[in-house]
Amino acid sequence: MKITKYIFVIGSAVLLSATWTGCNKFLDINPKSEVINDDMFSSAEGCEDALYGIYATIGSQSDLFGLDLSIAIPEILTGNIGSDRTNEYGEFAQRVWNLSYGPAARASLWRLCYEVIGYINNAILNLERSEEHFRYMDIYKGEAYALRAFMHFEVAKYFAVAFHSTDQERLNKALPYVTTYEYVVTPYSTLSDYFAKIIDDLKTAESYLADDERYVTAQRTNAATDFVSCRMIHLNLYAVKALLARVYWYMNDLENAEIYASQVIDSQKFPLMSSSEFINAENGTINLKETIFGLYSTQCPELYYRNFFQNNSFTLASGVIESYETDGLGVDVRVSRWFNTADRTCTKHLNPATASGQTYTGQSIIGIPLISISEMYMIVAEAKRTSDPAASIAAMDKVIEARGLTKYADRPDVSELSINDIVNERKKEFIMESLIFTDYKRLGRDVTIASSTFDGMDDDTYTMPIPATAEDNYRE
């Protein structure tokens, strides 16, 4: 699934769907019984096929970022969407993890995450031991290490307790951080060690991706000619720095989170849109200005349309639209861009081409944004909240002014931001992007769903039990 098979044509602005040749080749020649083989890594094209195959798997699987990890599970768990269907989503919403549908769903999520991690490990092992010196070899290695950290963080979001947990057993036995492709059982790491390994992998990736300082440009198009084009659909250098900011933020290490978030901002390569640009942006796409990293995916917009509009499997919770301030504080352009207030639906990931069954012909890239520049400003706003309130407000104002709202600096009687201010602004900015879940879990926020209130400091509110099938591996 090479980039040349995903042709992004700037002139006609037509995004052609790719064949899955590279992805299938990668998965087919690497059966689980085979620890390592060199077939795909003897050429630059093979290395690229392997990496594109990994990205494609993450973005296309409905149990991964095709639907569940990008939208369904995190938004269900924070009460932003609801489902009246009898399935795992309804059980998850009520934190009934082990009833009818939940165990199989959790086992599938766990299995797929670690299968992808296995593919990534195979790529890293082959790339590191290769004696070839392909032009973009360092870029290949950097993306592979970043992918491993990214996937392990996703596993931790759902299956590990938060850092504020008082359950010493679950803190000491958090999750396995898998770095091999062998059929062996990896011992559990403590939560601290697990996150230290995520950071180590991201810093390794950062060192390999130094050339992205020139490959990632402030002026971007959806045209791609080789592996280092369209860097926003790769885990590029700035995506790695942003992930480091996110991981440190999740660990409550705001000092380091601010350092990395500021580096991304200071690069000046990811400008916030003006409110007029925002109004004209395309839904269901990876924005070419603000997105630091997103997954090319036709599956996500298709499943979004099917579940939210065609089958009505999910519905927007009451109060979501009303949370966007309009009276006296400006006009929030996110309301008209992301919502249909008449039928109370969220159109954020609804691409018109997907909904009509047509080929997408827009100026961006169809898919789902996973890291955006607005998140970096909001991390800085929280990091400076008490130490430098004026700088904190200035960082937040960058985002909300771009969304059409009156700046906090111009509001009467506002001298500093509260943590509630920050969480509320993040909730509005990152609706349907899974980040609200990490906010609530990290801070131990209570959540009310269908008249049931769940204690945010209770580990079981935001932490899925590790599947019994995975635990069985440690008893054999």
Image (cartoon, grey):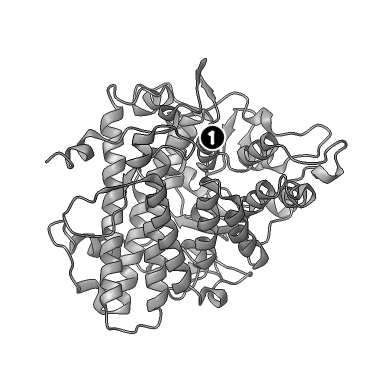
Of 215 and 146, nearer the camera is: 146
Percent coordinates x, y for residue 236 in the rendering: 49, 66
Q: Nearer the viewer, residue 291 or 337?
A: 291
Give the x, y percent position of residue 128.
30, 74
- Side (left or right) of 400 relative to 126: right
Residue occupying image coordinates x 77% and y 34%? 326
Instruction: Please report the residue visible at 46 percent of the width from the left and 75 percent of the height from the top.
Output: 225
443 lies left or right of 193: right
- Residue 381, placed above or below residue 24: above
- Residue where numbered disc 1 is placed: 440
Image quadrant assignment for residue 316: top right
Relative to 230, say whether 80 is above or below: above
In this image, 423 relative to 408: left or right? Answer: left
Residue 158 in sight here: yes
Q: Which amino acid type corresponds to the residue marked 1 in the rendered image? A: Tyr
In the figure, residue 39 lies in which quadrant?
bottom left
Q: Position of residue 347 (x, y in %)?
A: 57, 39
